[in-house]
Image: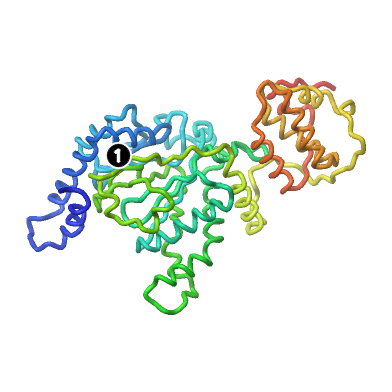
Amino acid sequence: MIGYELGRVILNLNKMNNPADNVSEKEERIRKITLMYYSKPEIQKAIFVFSQNRETIPRYFEGFGKRPDSFQYPSETFQMAQKGATSFHCSEELWADPLKISTNLNEKQLDELRIGWDFLIDIDSKYLDYSKVMAELVIKMLNFHGVKNIGIKFSGSKGFHIIVPWKAFPKEINDVKTSDMFPKYPRIIIKYLTEKIKPELVKRITEISHSNEYVKDVEESEKVIPDMILVSPRHLFRAPYSLHEKTALASVVIDANEIKNFHPRNADPMKAVVRNFIPDAKEGEASRLLMQALDWHKENNPDEKEKSYEAKAYKPIKLEKISDEYFPPSIKKILQGLSDGRKRALFVLINLFRAIGMERDELEKRLDDWNKKNAVPLKDGYIKAQILWSYRNKVVPPPNYDKDYYKGIGIIPTD
C-alpha cells in the first residue's frame, strides 16, 4: 500500500546506506504518489473550487511554476502532475482576474484588482503537539469574538492552517475599503490574537514539555507563533488537499474537535475524504474581531496614522429638537433614500448626526428609517458595524457639501 506508510519511508530515504537511493529516486517515488493521488476527480475538484479568484501556482518538487497563474478547469491539476507538479499553492488575496497581476503594478493598481482577502493563520512548530495547542487556543479566541464559521486543515507537515473567509469581514470601515487594507489588517489581527493567547499558550506548552520548570521566558511558546511571513502581498500557502513534498501527506481538512487527537496517518493521501475548507460564513461575523484588533493596535501604536478620513480637530455641538427641515439640501436628498452610494451616504449621515450631538438611540432610529427608504436596503449587520466603529473613534464632521464625494453618490451640490 502506498500513502502514509510510504510517506514515512520517503522521509528516511536519505538515511539509507544504499548510495543508489539518491535524491532522484526520492523524487521518483513521490511522483508515483502524486500521479495516483491527483488523478482522483474529487481531489481535482476540491483544489479547483478553492482556487477560484486566487493566484494558484504549481510546485515542481523544489521550485515553483511561473507567476501569475490560475486554473481554468479541474483536470489541470492532474495535467500539471503529469508534467512533474507535486503540490499546489494559493494566494490569500482574492482577485478579479489573477492573470492580470504583475510586479509592475503599483499599490493603487493592486487595490483596484483585489476584490478581497481571506484571513489565514499558518501555525507551524517544531512539534505537532505544540501546533495543536495553539490551533485550539486560536479557535477558542475566534469563537469568543463571535467568529463561528472557521476552516481548519493540516499543513502536511507539523502545523495547521486556520481560515476565516472574506465574507465574514465588513467591506468598509469608516469609509475605508477593507479589501485595500491587505496585508495590514490581517497582520494586526494575528498580532492581537497572539498577544491574547500567549499566557495560556505558555501554560499549556509547559504542561506537555519535557521540563518540569515553568517556561518564564516564553521561549517554547515562540516556536508556534503564527508565521508572519505568510501575511504578505502575493504570498502563497498550500491549497487544501495538496500533497506535501517532504512528507507525502495530504493537506486534509478537519473539524475543530478533531485537532486534539489528530495524527499524521489521518492525512494518508490514499484515504483522504474531501471536505470544504471555506465554511459558509455569515456576513460580517468577524466585524467585532477586526474592530477589537484595530482598537488594540491603536492603543499599542499611538503614533501610527490610520488610513482614514482626515479631519481637523472638531468640537461637537449639541442641538435640541433636531428636525429634517434644518438639514442642507444634500442631506435631505440622501434621507429620501438612494439606489447607489448607500455605504458612502451612511458614512455621511453617521458623522453628521454625531457632530450635531444626536443621541445614539435617535441616531440608530433615524438610520433605520432611512435605510428602509433605500431601493435596496443595507444589511442591518453592516450598519451596526459602522455605528460601532464610529463610536469607538473621535467625532469628525461629514465632508463639506461642495466636495466631489457627494457627486459620486448622485447628489448634486447646491448653494
Q: Is residue 114 left or right of residue 299?
A: left
The C terminus appears in which quarter of the rendering? Answer: top right
Q: Nearer the viewer, residue 314 or 210?
A: 210
Query: Given the image, on which type of amino acid does mark 1 rest?
Result: Pro
Q: Counting other residues with Cα less than 10 Å from the Cα at mark 1, is it few (<14), some (14-19), or many (20 or more)?
A: many
Quarter residue 86 falls in = top left
* Relative image position of residue 250 (x, y in whole percent): 29, 47
Q: Position of residue 117 (x, y in %)?
A: 49, 39
Against 30, residue 124 (above or below) is below
Extreme residue toward the bottom, this view: 213
Q: Is residue 44 found left or right of 394 in the rendered image?
A: left
Residue 309: percent from the left, percent from the top?
70, 40
- The residue depicted at 29 percent of the width and 52 percent of the height is 266
Q: Residue at x 20, y 49 (%)?
A: 3
- Left or right of 203? Residue 40 is left
Counting labels gives: 1
Q: Position of residue 323 (x, y in %)?
A: 89, 30
Image point (39%, 53%), residue name: 258
Q: Residue at x 7, y 60 (%)?
A: 18
Q: Residue 344 falls in which quadrant of the image?
A: top right
Q: Secondary structure at mark 1?
A: strand
The image quadrant of residue 54 is: top left
Residue that label 1 marks: 58
